[in-house]
Image (cartoon, rainbow, N blue to C red):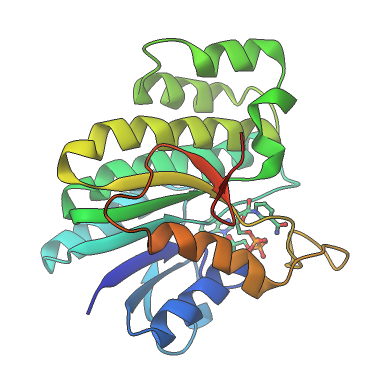
Amino acid sequence: MPTVLITGASRGIGRELAVTLAAQGWQVLAGVRDPLAAPAGTHAERVDMADAESIEALARRLRARGQALDALVNNAGVYEQARRLIWDVNVLGPLRLTLALEDLLAPGARVVMVTSGLGSLSAQPPELVRRLGAPGLSLDDLDSMAREAPGGYGASKAALTAMARLFADRLRDRGILVNAISPGWVRSDMGGANAPRSLRQGAASLLWGVQLPADGPSGGCFEDGLPLE
Ligand SMILES: NC(=O)c1ccc[n+]([C@@H]2O[C@H](COP(=O)([O-])OP(=O)(O)OC[C@H]3O[C@@H](n4cnc5c(N)ncnc54)[C@H](OP(=O)(O)O)[C@@H]3O)[C@@H](O)[C@H]2O)c1
């Protein structure tokens, strides 16, 4: 049975994806702050993505039981919050978690970084575009940038998209495909009631990245299987 870890599986798009994959026969590790919020049919894994120690504790638990991961979905995110929290949850959290779990990823695993159309590079200030596009950009650079928190939600998602590219390069030798994927504008607590897309449509966009064939893309940015930028 393939295993996936999905952060932010308590509600919204992450919960929908967790339920969908569980119904397809995956073992779903639901990354949640409150274990009681994990959907039925999944295994709750407590993690606060804003807390480095909580992320390390999750990695230690998984390592102690020899848990291989066939997919990792960095879905937890915050929108209208203080910049510090936005960069902690949307950028530092996925960076720390992916680094902490990279040796547990199975050969040929899939990693999805859940980005947003608001993170499109063309919508960012020129200085951020320059920094994210700099030749030789490294995960350490993204770590430093996240500690500065240079911008709001869109900037954090632009950084997450760049992170997907860097992890794609880093993990390519192991056949691991890493992509930034947007769910589109979805009716969740975050997206609000006026969003045009359902939770199911949002989750389907992410599902595409989890179920990519071995010769699928890596290091790209997509929505509904189509390149975003
Ligand atoms: N909705 C949209 O229109 C839209 C558009 C583009 C991209 N996205 C992205 O899609 C992803 C899911 O969004 P959504 O619409 O499903 O949002 P949501 O309904 O607000 O759910 C957010 C999820 O993130 C979790 N989370 C927040 N802070 C956390 C933390 N510190 N540690 C662990 N988990 C935390 C929440 O857990 P709790 O229940 O514990 O708070 C919840 O499960 C996000 O990355 C978002 O940026 C959404």
Depth check, front residue: 147 or 139: 139
203 vs 181: above or below? below
Question: 92 or 162: which is nearer to us?
Answer: 162
Q: Quadrant of residue 3?
A: bottom left
Query: Measured from the top left, where is residue 30 in percent x and y?
Result: 41, 72
Asked if one can make out residue 153 in the rendered structure from this viewpoint, the answer is: no
Picture layout, residue 229 above or below residue 214: above
Task: Kindly indicate the quadrant of the structure image that contains residue 210.
Answer: bottom left
Vertical arrangement, residue 88 with respect to residue 24, above or below:
above
Q: Residue at x 34, y 48 (%)?
A: 53
User: Residue 187, located in which quarter of the rendered image?
Assistant: bottom right
Q: Is residue 126 left or right of residue 67?
A: right
Residue 222 visible in rendering: yes
In which quadrant of the rendered image does the C terminus lie?
top right
Quadrant in which ligand 1 is drawn: bottom right
Which image quarter is the N terminus in? Answer: bottom left
Q: Please, which residue is most extreme toward the right here?
A: 194
Outermost front residue: 215
Q: Is residue 159 left or right of residue 211?
A: right
In percent of the image, x 25 and y 50: which residue is there?
A: 101
The spot of residue 25 in percent (x, y) is 33, 85
Query: Which residue is pictured at 56% across the width and 61% down the height?
Result: 205
Q: Position of residue 7 (x, y in %)?
A: 46, 61
Q: Seen in the image, is 61 located left or right of residue 195?
A: left
Residue at 62%, 57% (x, y): give it.
183
Q: Where in the figure is residue 122, as x and y percent of width and height?
A: 70, 24
